[in-house]
Image (tube, rainbow, N blue to C red):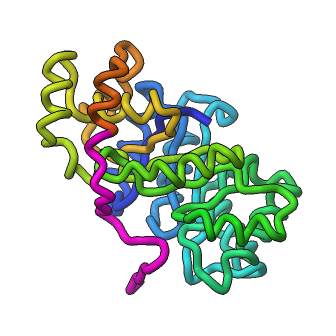
Amino acid sequence: MPYLGLGVFKMTDPEEAIQAVSKALEVGYRAIDTAALYKNEGEVGEAIRNSRVPREEIFVTTKVWNSDQGYDETLRAFETSLEKLGLDYIDLYLTHWPVEDKLVDTYRAIERLYEEKLIRVPGVSNHHAHHLEKIFATANVKPMVNQIELHPYLTQLELREFCKENDIAVTAWSPLGRGGVLQDATITKIAQQLEKSTAQVILRWHYQHGIISIPKSVTPSRIEENMQIFDFELSQEQVAQIDKLNKNQRFGQNPDNFHFDF
């Protein structure tokens, strides 16, 4: 799984979504992260098919939404996503949020999809350690990925350590803190020292911590800029300075207390 991918949350305009994914693939991205909720799986699939990049080189992630969770429901939701994407398989399939009375059955369905080789990697999103432990109690194969909100203001160190101990890769959604971290004085100073953008510094910080990140952008120049994080390195001191910015501040909802009207 590539360490940097394109997130397509809120890309509701079909043409905009196709252009963003196409641009990302053109400049070197090899991971695209969508979800049933985003209502753009069709556009993601179209951009992939229209690109010159072989399918096997592109890591595609999608997710089952909360209202579609449960064992049979998840299997049906997967078929819908697969059809919309127009693909033969999905690389990574995730539970979107841990619906308390359904998360175990939902993951059992994801396990089955993995066993049937319809997905390459089984995983979850927004799961705390106690959610994961509930899944471990019955799982034959542990989740291999946990996608969580993670950025310099919410470093989630304890959860990251738990995932590391259990061989679960961590993916950061909102890796730039929905833009709320970009103006931080410490990060701005480091960016000036390195002659890089603050976004590049933050994404590099994720990379040096072994965290997969999926920044979202529809702006071609930013899509390209976000990919340019492999030609420089943060010093240990700079990494430590960013680590200290943690405020346990969420820009999204808490998996222990979430509510959506859709």
* Quadrant for the C terminus in the image: bottom left
Examine the structure image and report whether residue 31 is included in the region drawn in magenta: no
**Where is 146 relative to 67, above or below?**
above
**Where is 27 relative to 152, above or below?**
above
Q: Position of residue 134 (x, y in %)?
A: 71, 72
Q: Quadrant of residue 225?
A: top left
Residue 158 vs residue 105, the one in the foreground: 158
Regarding residue 162, the answer to whether it shows in the image is: yes
Residue at image coords 66%, 73%? 77
Provide the major secondary structure of the magenta segment. Answer: loop
Residue 257 vs residue 111, the one in the foreground: 257
Examine the structure image and report whether residue 257 is included in the region drawn in magenta: yes
Q: Is residue 233 left or right of residue 190?
A: right
**Where is 199 relative to 146, above or below?**
above
Q: Quadrant of residue 2?
A: top right
Residue at image coords 66%, 47%? 168
Q: Position of residue 56 (x, y in %)?
A: 69, 34
Q: Is residue 160 left or right of residue 257?
A: right
Q: How many marks?
A: 0
Residue at image coords 11%, 37%? 185
* Quadrant for the N terminus in the image: top right
Q: Quadrant of residue 62?
A: bottom right
**Where is 16 relative to 50, above or below?**
below
Q: Position of residue 213 (x, y in %)?
A: 45, 41
Q: Position of residue 220 (x, y in %)?
A: 28, 35
Magenta region: which residues? 244-262
Residue at image coords 73%, 75%? 104
